[in-house]
């Protein structure tokens, strides 16, 4: 289903699309079916892999993806998931330090603690 564009400025419309996708991913992540959860993971990865247009959307996507991967790690106990999640947490901590954001720094440290 195409996403309707509500404004004429390309940057603003791209931000709106990312916010829409993030909201969709957060809803899909709460579903129990693996198909929906996998779709949520793909959307979150898409947001993270694209350019950073809206910092808060990017950070929420990072934290949500890390949270999703932590759930997979506890369910499957696969060390490959560790290799995926550690760089994401490091990226979150780097962004938090660059922005002097204690909230996001605390979120990153909490995610690191959950890994230990």
Image (tube, rainbow, N blue to C red):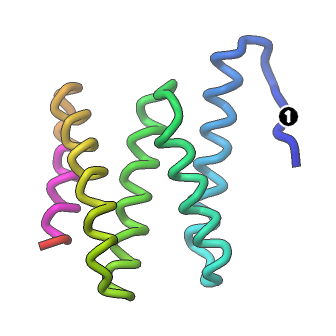
In the image, taking residue 65 as reference, residue 39 lies left or right, namely right
Q: Quadrant of the C terminus?
A: bottom left
| Residue at x-position 64% and y-position 17% | 11
Q: Nearer the viewer, residue 44 or 15?
A: 44
10 Å crowding of disc 1: few (<14), some (14-19), many (20+): few
Q: Where is residue 96? Give x, y as percent.
A: 22, 36
In the image, taking residue 30 as reference, residue 99 lies left or right, namely left
Describe the element under mark 1 as helix, strand or loop: loop
In the image, taking residue 68 as reference, residue 47 lies left or right, namely right
| Residue at x-position 59% and y-position 70% | 38
Q: Which residue is mark 1?
A: 4
Residue at the outermost top position: 9
Quadrant of the image occupied by residue 42:
bottom right
Q: Where is residue 21? Give x, y as percent.
A: 65, 46
Quadrant of the image occupied by residue 68:
bottom left
Q: Where is residue 57? Give x, y as percent.
A: 48, 38
Figure check: 114 above or below 96: below
Q: Where is residue 93? Give x, y as percent.
A: 20, 42
Queried whether the magenta region covers residue 13, the answer comes back as no
Q: What is the magenta segment's predominant secondary structure?
A: helix
User: Where does the magenta region start and end?
Assistant: 104-114
Q: Nearer the viewer, residue 34 or 12?
A: 34
Figure check: 113 above or below 86: below
| Residue at x-position 21% and y-position 33% | 101
Figure check: 10 above or below 97: above
Quadrant of the image occupied by residue 37:
bottom right
């Amino acid at each position: 289903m195409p996403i309707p564009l509500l404004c004429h400025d390309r940057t603003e419309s791209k931000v709106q699309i990312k916010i829409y996708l993030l909201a969709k991913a957060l809803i899909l992540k709460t579903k129990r079916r693996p198909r929906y959860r996998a779709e949520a993971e793909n959307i979150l990865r898409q947001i993270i892999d694209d350019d950073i247009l809206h910092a808060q959307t990017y950070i929420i996507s990072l934290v949500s993806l890390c949270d999703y991967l932590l759930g997979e790690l506890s369910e499957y106990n696969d060390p490959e998931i560790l290799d995926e999640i550690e760089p994401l947490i490091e990226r979150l901590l780097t962004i938090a330090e660059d922005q002097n954001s204690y909230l996001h720094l605390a979120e990153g440290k909490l995610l690191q603690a959950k890994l230990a």
